[in-house]
Image (spheres, coloured by chain):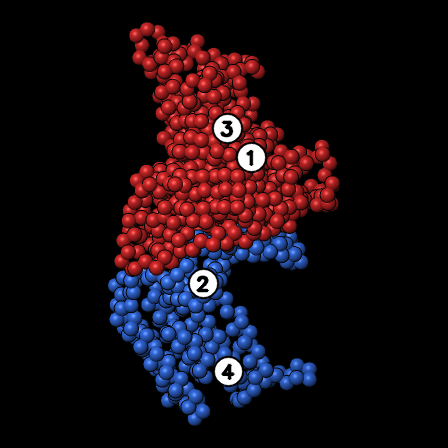
Amino acid sequence: MFAVEAKGYRYTYPDGGAPALDIDWFGVREGEFVLLIGNSGTGKSTLLRAVRGLVPMFHGGVASGSLTVLGREVRGCDPLFLAESVGIVFQDPEAQLFMTTVDREVAFGLQNLGWSTPSIARSVSEALNYLGIAHLRNARVSELSGGEKQKVALASVLAMQPRIILLDEPTSQLDPVAAEEFFDLVKRINEDLGTTVLIAEQRLDRCFHMADAVWLFDGGKVTALGPPRQAVSDLFRRGIETPTVARLFQESGYGEDGSRGLPLTIRDGRMEILRRWTPLAPAGQPANQAINHFVNQPSGRLEGRRRSAAAGDEGCAVPARRRWSDGEPVVELKGVSHRFGGVGRGGGRDGALLDGQALSDVSLTIRGGEFVAVLGENGAGKSTLLRVIAGVTKPSEGRVTVRGGNGAGGLAWLSQNPNDHLVHDTVREEIAAALERSGRDGRGASEKGAWSADSPVWRLVDRLRLAAFLDRNPRDLSSGERERVALGTVLAGSPRLILLDEPTRGMDGDAKRTLAAALREMTEGGAAVVMVTHDVDLAAECASRVIVMSGGRIVADGPPEAVLDGALFYSPQVNRLFRYWVKGIVRYDEALGLLGGGRSRGN
Amino acid sequence: MLCAGYAVSSFAMRDAIGILAVLCSEAVVAWCNWGLRRWARNLRFLAPVAVTVVGINALFGSGDPALAAVKCGPIDVKITIESLANGISMALRLFSAAGAFALLELVANQDDVLFAISSPSSRFSLAAALTLRLVPYLRRRVASIHDVQCMTSVEGSSLKARIWSRIPVLKAAVSESLELSLNLAEAMFARGWGVGPRGRYPASRFRLNDLVVVVASACGTALLLWYAPEGGARSSQTTLSVLRWTAFALVPAVACLAACGPRRWFGVRRGG
């Protein structure tokens, strides 16, 4: 029996336009863990909403065809049945929690279902214990970290004991640790309780291998890709983002004969490396030593390639190590501490933030041309650091020196919420206003055709892929698209210091690469970039320097090879793949070169 | 009940001393609920209005005896003790009435209020619930967008430029707050809001202390309402009536102290 089945289902939002969903057939068996992938705005979230009955019942619009949940047609279905059978967790925890305390939040759905008080109390306790957040039972929701909030959202759905759980990019705002914890919990629910799980996700590395089936969304249409091992080859053929490990092996020429499936996890990848390299080792040597000898000796593959790269061999797949910038300092922080007025503010319950200490004795110098990635758990003080540099928050102690003012050639800050930057009616007006603010001539820029194709602004628009929706209201765009527009408003003034607070939230892989290229171009022009991110792989690819924060302090600061190499959680996938064998592998191209791939990704 | 009583008392009282007693009584209740500072902070924004009220009453009121007389063109302005007292009592009434509502925020759990208003119709209650959440979110959004606008030098130097720059900020903040409200409504709908009869959680925590406060508040308010018009008509200036009113205004506060004071003194917070 299919838990969810759609036949000839079409749905159009009330504002008209092309159908958001145009599905010939889609089916999910009971107990399956199904992954929905595809770029932003391709219909993943709409399908989840349709399964829960939110479209068209809540949002309006026109639906045709058949969509059944547990054998019942969703349209015209008893709302109580749907509420009991299907639970949904949305992307933004802020937009789905509305009670003041955790236990009341978890109990909310059960109250709506009319459960008795003892049953509610029991189910609340069980859900909190199952997800390991019983200690938060009486905590105020507003004081929780992002990861905790998302767990509470999951607990509030789990407590209702639905047969189907829908998850709409639930980890997009979580740090790597919290995201991994969250996926593990979801898988546990799927396996322990037999709950059907449909998850729409952009971060494939952590959940792709968990799925029983993968469906690809494109322009409202869905394509069945089958189980992950089968799906990954298909995705690669279509030129669509795949998990890093699988892409690495595919690009290195592995499995081209189709005899074996691609490795999807770090464990599978490591086993494959051992299988492949052990025969190459001198007789009698254990596999680990063989690999070490093979790649780390002066004559070894990696060192040889690095030397070639340093010598300017363009055909070399391994890039030379990035150097520390020797540009002029653009920001200097000396002994900066900041304490929030109230306990628990700043979004975290962990460590120092419990007593309101957001930054603690931070000293830092950032130079022109540097690309600094700031990593750390939710509530570590990363955003506060940016706010202090931007001058939005005055530190309680210490001194901040920023060279150059705001606007053109000065400082630009992209806040965590892209909507903060979007106050005009069209994307074109936003960019024009940003130009005007920065002192560059923005007059008349809001007119159609006012930007010449060779102007720097148009290049920026083109690079950030904004051209397609220049005349649309930014608030009508998807979260990833909004993020790009906000970024456009920030970069339009060609600032010398760019502060970005989680700019890749909700972005698909292509958009991330586009962003990385745009930022790298700016650093090559002498600008300094400070980017707070949870995306360790992106940090490894782009940054020339990585800072890790915890509890308001800088706990690590250095080049990516030094900081990310061997880190337990803040390490990129490729580093984990070669951990214990090869030191300093943090970038995709380095790993690809090591595996013997001749084809560079060219980014 | 307590807050309604205070709100009614604020308007029923006529003497400044009586209204001051109500205000003090509210302060006691706020203190008992661990929120005296927050309650006072919420009232702070009324200060300019109160000063204006006192000023207008003092300048344009009538009565005796005169403290000062000024001739402003064709108008004779006479400041009298009575007009000054009237102005002060009106300002106090303003604080007292607003204080009663500020108290409601302290003593009532928002979640309970949400469920209390959600019985009549799910659509109405959904709208009401969202309104409860909209205002604080709107405040946060305005502050957040304002930070960005300050950063990007949108805040012009002239007053006109500043006012002009605030319009899109407000527009964006309102539209985003409404969008969030819609998302919240969707989340509530997704979790079965309004699908049928509702269960209760947590189990009722109505204790004897709460009963004492409610009964005392009800008695105090009833007595006050019964006495105020009669006493006011007979002699609003007599010390006796002022003392009576003051005593009645303090009944709920005393009850609240008796019921909640020990917990407050021994540092025990209300659960939940």
Residue type pointed to by label 1: Ala
Pointer 1: residues within 10 angstroms few (<14), some, or many (20+)?
many
Nearer the observer, disc 4 or disc 1? 1
What residue appears at the point 56 percent right and 14 percent down from the top-left corner?
A315
Labels 3 and 4 in the same subunit: no
Task: Report which residue position mark 1 lands on.
Answer: A511
Mark on residue B86?
4
- Of residues A527 and A306, the one nearer the viewer is A306
Q: Position of residue A494 (x, y in %)?
A: 63, 37
- Of residues A20 and A297, the one nearer the viewer is A20
Q: Is residue B174 left or right of residue A198?
A: right
Instruction: Measure how far apart labels 3 and 4 are at the Cα level.
Output: 80 Å
Which quadrant of the rendered structure holds the C terminus of chain A? Answer: top right
Q: Position of residue A248 (x, y in %)?
A: 46, 22
Subunit of mark 4? Answer: B
Instruction: Measure how far apart labels 1 and 3 are at the Cα level.
Output: 17 Å
Mark on residue B59?
none
What residue appears at the point 30 percent right and 70 percent down from the top-left corner?
B210
- Of residues A336 and A386, the one nearer the viewer is A386
What residue appears at the point 61 percent right and 83 percent down from the top-left corner?
B77
- Regarding mark 4 in the picture, which secondary structure is present there? helix
Subunit of mark 1? Answer: A
Mark on residue B122?
2
Q: Earlier in the sequence, mark 4 or mark 2?
A: 4
Q: Position of residue A90 (x, y in %)?
A: 45, 46
Labels 4 and 2 in the same subunit: yes
Residue type pointed to by label 2: Ser
Q: Which chain is red?
A: A
